[in-house]
C-alpha cells in the first residue's frame, strides 16, 4: 500500500467487506444516538476507530448531514493521519483514502438511490469519486449499511486543483476550500470567477452567454448532469454540487462533482411549494405546483429550475438547444442493458448486507424500516421506472429532431 509522504505508513489488508468500528465510552455512544440537529466532533482520549479490527490513526470523526442529524444512525466525516487501501465496488480496484464520508442513508428505505445515481453519473464520466458500501459498528454493535464516499474536498487536491466550493442557494458559496500551489492565484480570484457565471446570466444571452459560461465552467459536463437529473427525477438540487477549479492557459474553469443523490424518483422538483431557495436573478419566482413549472418551461427535458443557471438554460433558446444536443448524444448511448447491468451490480453489492439480520435490524432507526422483500420489490420497481423514462426520453428527442 502506497503512503503519501505526509502520512505515516500502516499496512492494511484489502478487504471487500470492509467493517469500520468506533469504540467509545457507553456515555458517548448514547450521546451519539440521542443527539439531534447538531454537527459535532467526537473525541475521547481512549477512543479507537478501526477498519477490520486494525486501529487507525484518526485525526477527526465528525457527525454531518442536515437530514442524518435527525436520526439515531448518524452520518460521519472521517479524517485520518494515514491512508488506507480499500477495494472498490467490484472487489478489484484499489483506492487509497485519508478523508471520506460515511453516509447513513437514513431516508432511503432500501439504500439504493445514491448508488443508482452515482452509477449512472460515473458511466457518463461526471462522478469521479470513489464510493462503496461498508458496515459501521459502534462498540461492537452494527449501525447498519453505510455508503462510503471519497471526500470531494480531498479529491480536488489530488487532481491538482487549488480551490473547490459547494454551491449554495441564491448563487452563493456555501462552503469552500483553498490550498494555493504553483498557480499563485488568490482565493478571491476563484470566488470572483464563480460569481461571474451568475452575473453573466443577466448581462448576456444566446451564443454570447453560452461562450461566457463555457469559458468559466464545463457546460457539456453540467448539461449531462442536468439530463441525468431529469432521467432520475432528482428531488435534491441547488446545493448538492461541488465546483472545483482548473487552470487552463492562465484561465480559471470549473468542473463539477455531483453530490447526494438520495432523493430520486420524485414526482416534482425541490422548489415546488417552497417560499425560499429559488433563484431571484430573474425576479421573484415561486411555484405552488409542478404544473406551474411546466406552464413556464413547457415540455423541455429539465426537471428542476430552482437554480438561476438551470432556469437560464431552460429559457434561453440557444442554451437549451446546446443542452438538447448534449442530452440527445448521451441518452442515445444509454441502453436498457446498461440499466439492467447496473441494477445487477447493486444487487450483488447489497445482498451480503441484506443477508445479515444484525445489519438490517438497524433500519428500524431510519425514516422507514427495510427488509429483503421491500428491497427486492423497490429494486424491480425503480429499474422499470428508469427504463420506461429512458425510452420515453428517446422518443421525445426523436420527435423534436423531426
Image (spheres, rainbow, N blue to C red):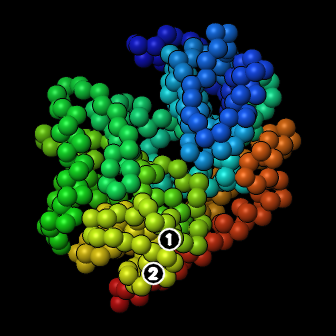
Q: Which mark is residue 272?
A: 1
Residue 274, given in percent of the width and then of the height, sits at 49, 66
The residue located at (47%, 41%) in the rendering is: 129
Q: Which mark is residue 292?
A: 2
Residue 293, given in percent of the width and then of the height, sits at 44, 78
The correct choice, above or below, for 260 with respect to 282 in the image is: above
The residue located at (79%, 52%) in the rendering is: 369
Left or right of 190 in this view: 37: right
Residue 25, given in percent of the width and then of the height, sits at 75, 17
Query: Closest to the observer: 355 or 66?
Result: 66
Q: Are marks 1 and 2 in contact (CB under 8 Å)?
A: yes
Location of residue 342 by image quarter: bottom right
Location of residue 177 by image quarter: top left
Q: Which mark is residue 323?
A: none
Left or right of 309 in this view: 86: right
Is residue 13 visible in the rendered image? The answer is: no
Looking at marks 1 and 2 on the same chain, the residue that comes earlier in the sequence is marked by 1
Q: Secondary structure at mark 1?
A: loop
Q: How far apart in space, not on screen, are marks 1 and 2 (Cα)?
A: 9 Å
The residue located at (46%, 71%) in the rendering is: 303
Residue 76, given in percent of the width and then of the height, sits at 59, 33
The correct choice, above or below, for 36 with respect to 381 in the image is: above
Query: Closest to the observer: 212 or 305?
Result: 305
The correct choice, above or below, for 166 with respect to 215 in the image is: above
The residue located at (19%, 45%) in the rendering is: 192
Is residue 64 visible in the rendered image? The answer is: yes
Amino acid at each position: 500500500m502506497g503512503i503519501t509522504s505526509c502520512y505515516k505508513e500502516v499496512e492494511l489488508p484489502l478487504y471487500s467487506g470492509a467493517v469500520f468500528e468506533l469504540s467509545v465510552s457507553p456515555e458517548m455512544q448514547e450521546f451519539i444516538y440521542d443527539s439531534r440537529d447538531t454537527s459535532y466532533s467526537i473525541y475521547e482520549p481512549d477512543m479507537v476507530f478501526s477498519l477490520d479490527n486494525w486501529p487507525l490513526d484518526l485525526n477527526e470523526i465528525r457527525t454531518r448531514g442536515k437530514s442524518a442529524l435527525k436520526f439515531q444512525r448518524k452520518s460521519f466525516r472521517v479524517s485520518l493521519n494515514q491512508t488506507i487501501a480499500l477495494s472498490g465496488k467490484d472487489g478489484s480496484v484499489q483506492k487509497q483514502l485519508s478523508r471520506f464520508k460515511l453516509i447513513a442513508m437514513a431516508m432511503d428505505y432500501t439504500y439504493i438511490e445514491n448508488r443508482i445515481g452515482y452509477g449512472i453519473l460515473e458511466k457518463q464520466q461526471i462522478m469521479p469519486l470513489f464510493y462503496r458500501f461498508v458496515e459501521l459498528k459502534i462498540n461492537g454493535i452494527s449501525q447498519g449499511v453505510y455508503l462510503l464516499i471519497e471526500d470531494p474536498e480531498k479529491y480536488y487536491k489530488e487532481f491538482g486543483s487549488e480551490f473547490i466550493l459547494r454551491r449554495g442557494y441564491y448563487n452563493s458559496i456555501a462552503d469552500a476550500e483553498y490550498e494555493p500551489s504553483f498557480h499563485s492565484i488568490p482565493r478571491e480570484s476563484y470566488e470572483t470567477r464563480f460569481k461571474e457565471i451568475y452575473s453573466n446570466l443577466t448581462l448576456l444571452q444566446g451564443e454570447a452567454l453560452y461562450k461566457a459560461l463555457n469559458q468559466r465552467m464545463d457546460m457539456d459536463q453540467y448539461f449531462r448532469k442536468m439530463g441525468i437529473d431529469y432521467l432520475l427525477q432528482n428531488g435534491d438540487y441547488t446545493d448538492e454540487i461541488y465546483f472545483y477549479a482548473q487552470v487552463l492557459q492562465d484561465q480559471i474553469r470549473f468542473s463539477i462533482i455531483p453530490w447526494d443523490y438520495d432523493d430520486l424518483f420524485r414526482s416534482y422538483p425541490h422548489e415546488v411549494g417552497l417560499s425560499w431557495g429559488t433563484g431571484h436573478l430573474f425576479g421573484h419566482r415561486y411555484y405552488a405546483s409542478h404544473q406551474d413549472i411546466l406552464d413556464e418551461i413547457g415540455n423541455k427535458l429539465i426537471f428542476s429550475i430552482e437554480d438561476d443557471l438551470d432556469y437560464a438554460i431552460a429559457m434561453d433558446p440557444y442554451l437549451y438547444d446546446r443542452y438538447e444536443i448534449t442530452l440527445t448524444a448521451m441518452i442515445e448511448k444509454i441502453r436498457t442493458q446498461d440499466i439492467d447491468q447496473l441494477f445487477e451490480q447493486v444487487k450483488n453489492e447489497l445482498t451480503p448486507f441484506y443477508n445479515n439480520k444484525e445489519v438490517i435490524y438497524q433500519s428500524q432507526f431510519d425514516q422507514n424500516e427495510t427488509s429483503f422483500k421491500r428491497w427486492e420489490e423497490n429494486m424491480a420497481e425503480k429499474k422499470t421506472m428508469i427504463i420506461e423514462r429512458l425510452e420515453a426520453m428517446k422518443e421525445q428527442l426523436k420527435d423534436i429532431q423531426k
